[in-house]
């Protein structure tokens, strides 16, 4: 009876979150879409549907990666951006503009730019963190510390390039360094979906072991889990998910922290299948609603990343000051 009541409780929460996502999606697609004019309405949908899909994909990738990363580290106030993906993204884009110019094919062609971002971040992160995980005797906290150092290292190089860059080139570069859901490239949507689906498929067995891994290394090993191998594979999966999301929309530092912790507070469970789904839905609702407000209230004057950064910073302080026992 208790189990069925728990499932009913989850059902109500997920029904509410799904309804919220659908309502936000409908509002985003229909508000000021000129429905009285079929041609304008069709044109508006052609612009908005790809953007909506990108927001959903990014929310799923960031939400799922944040839940997994927090469970591996066993801390609720950390985010995957500590692994240096955001800094690496900024460095890659800055280096491209600095060395080959903002008018080059690499910078102008969105498909090529996405592929370069994904390949460089994916290969570099897989090599760095896979190698470091072995060299540190599979100590996750050392990897986290090294990721923080690498973030500062990448940021320092990027700042140096910016200082000596032509001001006109920097103006062009600045647009790509801010998370942006406008003017998305619809050509990368299918590729991103297939990549994330393949990633989830290959990590399905490791994801199923997350409930056991959160008990601690010793307990997980006693229960028959190959802890080091599982954590290494999950950590690389987190890195690739963040690489996909960052390459699609740019760096969104605090989004994972917000949606992962809201999902944990709403569901109050250690079952990761529920937590990942909940974080993805919370992320979709937050991003779509934020984009709607940014477009129709602030008229594109303020990027959505600004709201996420401010809200994330306030929420981080709230968790740190009032939820210390749960972190």
Image (spheres, rainbow, N blue to C red):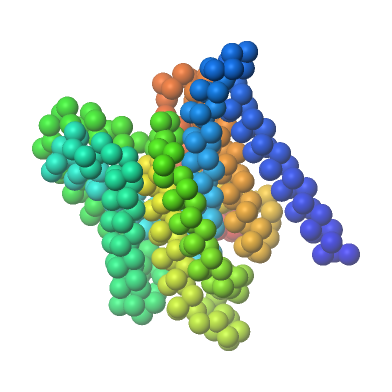
Vertical placement of residue 225 versus 108, above or below: below
Residue 179 x/y as whole percent:
39, 37
Residue 33 spot, x, y in % from top left = 57, 19
Residue at 58% across, 81% down? 219
Residue situated in front as seen by the camera: 48 or 292:
48
Please identify the quadrant where the C terminus is shown: bottom right
| Residue situated furthest front in the rendering | 39
Q: Which quadrant of the structure image shows residue 253?
A: top left
Identify whether 301 is placed above or below 48: above
Give the quadrant of residue 111.
top left
Residue for point 54% across, 17% down: 39
Residue 4 image offset from top left, x and y in percent: 84, 61
Q: Is residue 257 left or right of residue 88?
A: right
Is residue 249 in sight in this rendering?
Answer: yes
Q: Residue at x 51, y 22 (%)?
A: 43
Relative placement, left or right, of 23 versus 310 is right
Task: Looking at the picture, tell me which residue is in the foreground, 286 or 32.
Answer: 32
The furthest residue to the right: 1
Camera-nearest residue between 218 and 4: 4
Quadrant of the rendered structure where residue 126 is? Answer: bottom left
- 91 shown above or below 220: above
79 sits left or right of 106 in the view: right
Quadrant where the N terminus lies?
bottom right
Give percent across and percent down for residue 154.
24, 52
């Amino acid at each position: 009876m208790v189990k069925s009541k728990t499932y009913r409780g989850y059902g109500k929460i997920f029904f509410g979150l799904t309804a919220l996502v659908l309502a936000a999606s409908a509002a985003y697609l229909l508000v000021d879409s000129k429905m009285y004019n079929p041609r304008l309405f069709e044109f508006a949908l052609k612009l908005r549907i790809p953007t909506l899909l990108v927001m959903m994909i990014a929310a799923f990738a960031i939400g799922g990666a944040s839940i997994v990363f927090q469970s591996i580290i066993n801390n609720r106030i950390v985010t995957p951006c500590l692994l240096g993906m955001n800094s690496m993204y900024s460095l890659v884009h800055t280096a491209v503009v600095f060395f080959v110019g903002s008018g080059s094919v690499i910078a102008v062609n969105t498909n090529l730019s996405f592929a370069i971002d994904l390949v460089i971040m994916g290969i570099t992160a897989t090599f760095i963190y896979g190698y470091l995980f072995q060299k540190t005797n599979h100590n996750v906290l050392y990897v986290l510390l090294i990721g923080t150092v690498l973030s500062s290292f990448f940021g320092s190089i990027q700042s140096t390039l910016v200082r000596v860059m032509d001001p006109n080139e920097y103006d062009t570069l600045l647009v790509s360094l801010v998370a942006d859901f406008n003017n998305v490239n619809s050509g990368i949507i299918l590729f991103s979906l297939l990549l994330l689906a393949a990633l989830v498929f290959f990590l399905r067995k490791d994801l199923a072991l997350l409930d056991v891994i959160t008990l601690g290394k010793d307990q997980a090993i006693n229960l028959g889990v190959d802890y080091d191998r599982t954590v290494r594979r999950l950590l690389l999966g987190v890195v690739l998910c963040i690489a996909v999301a960052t390459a699609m929309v740019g760096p969104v530092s605090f989004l994972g922290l917000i949606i992962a912790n809201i999902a944990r507070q709403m569901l109050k469970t250690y079952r990761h299948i529920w937590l990942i789904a909940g974080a993805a839905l919370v992320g979709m609702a937050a991003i779509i609603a934020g984009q709607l407000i940014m477009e129709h209230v602030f008229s594109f004057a303020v990027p959505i990343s600004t709201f996420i950064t401010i809200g994330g910073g306030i929420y981080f302080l709230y968790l740190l000051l009032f939820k210390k026992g749960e972190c």
